Amino acid sequence: MSQPDGAGASGDDGMNLFRVFRTFWILLVAVCFSLDSASIAQPAANDPATPPSEASLTVTGRGEIFARPDRAVVRVGVDVQAKEAVAAQTDANQRMQKILKDLKTLGIPDRFLATRSIELFPMTASVPESEAIEVRGYRATQIVEVTVDRVEMTGKVLDSAFKSGANRFEGVSFGLENDLPQRREALRLAVAEAAAKAETIVSALGGRLVSITEVSEEGSGVEQPMPMARGRIMAMADTAVQPGEARVTAGVRVVYSIIPGPQKGPSGAEPAASPKSQSQPR
């Protein structure tokens, strides 16, 4: 039995309305699901669960070692005058030869004896009531450098030189024949100090060290004891020599990569965590 035309049109309209509502609800559910997924996948920048970024920390360290010198360098010589140049030079040569001979008797080998200077020059003066310059004599000087590999022999070397005719003293310096072990130990102490500084700083910040990104050595050296003064010596006996200590230093600069601790607010407290995203009721 056929239905009236009005009834068929009404049924089609109802079916179309149903399809529209169904499509709307599907789209609404999809949008809500997408929003929830985005809030989970992308936490807020202030979320405490977000891993903090790394920063850099630069520290320096210094180490020093004191060591007793095991080598001395003595510089002595002769300073003589004579009317003639040949006489002055001859006198200086004879004195120096005796000095060197007596030093070798003490056991100083030839390789530890080195002539540092030989000079001969005229001694002049102005002639009264005249612009002329006249030569009144000649002065000859010779300086020898003596390396003493046993520091306790330094006093005996000086005494021998002065008794043999030396009348000029250019000084004594002390040092280490091989300072490599002391340099290494000072460097180790410098690195340890830098590491301790870094640990202290990062601990106070509530963070942690990650790795070392850069290391450089700087400010290393050896400071010798104060040398004995120079001058002209006419006589000296039973010389007592105290070498003191050499100071060996080392410095390092280290750059660390660190992860800082949580930031503090004005009152010193950590900032409150951001509330987690919650889905709104639908």
Image (tube, helix red, strand yellow):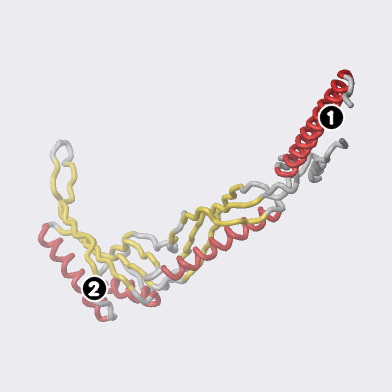
Residue 27's spot in the image, x, y percent?
77, 33
Asked whether, in this view, residue 73 is left or right of residue 25, the answer is left
Secondary element under disc 1, as helix, strand or loop, is: helix
Q: Could you tell me which quadrant the N terminus lies in?
A: top right
Residue 190's spot in the image, x, y percent?
53, 61
* Quarter of the figure with residue 195: bottom right
Judge by depth and name the residue closer to the eye, 157 or 19: 19
Indicate whether 156 appears above or below 166. below
Secondary element under disc 2, as helix, strand or loop, is: helix
Judge by depth and name the residue closer to the eye, 50 or 152: 50
Which numbered circle lies on residue 95?
A: none
Judge by depth and name the residue closer to the eye, 24 or 102: 24
Q: Could you tell me which quadrant the C terminus lies in?
A: top right
Asked whether, in this view, residue 226 is left or right of residue 272, the answer is left
The residue at the point 29 percent across, 70 percent down is: 146
Q: Mark 1 points at which residue?
A: 18
Residue 88's spot in the image, x, y percent?
15, 61
Indicate whether 148 appears above or below 197. below
Identify residue type, mark 1: Phe
- The local crowd at label 1, few if under 14, some if 14 to 19, many if 20 or more residues have their Cα within 10 Å, is few
- The local crowd at label 2, few if under 14, some if 14 to 19, many if 20 or more residues have their Cα within 10 Å, is few
Q: Say whether marks 1 and 2 touch (CB < 8 Å).
A: no
Q: Mark 2 points at which residue?
A: 111
Asked whether, in this view, residue 190 is left or right of residue 29, the answer is left
The residue at the point 81 percent across, 43 percent down is: 276
Judge depth for marks 1 and 2 and give the one in front: 1
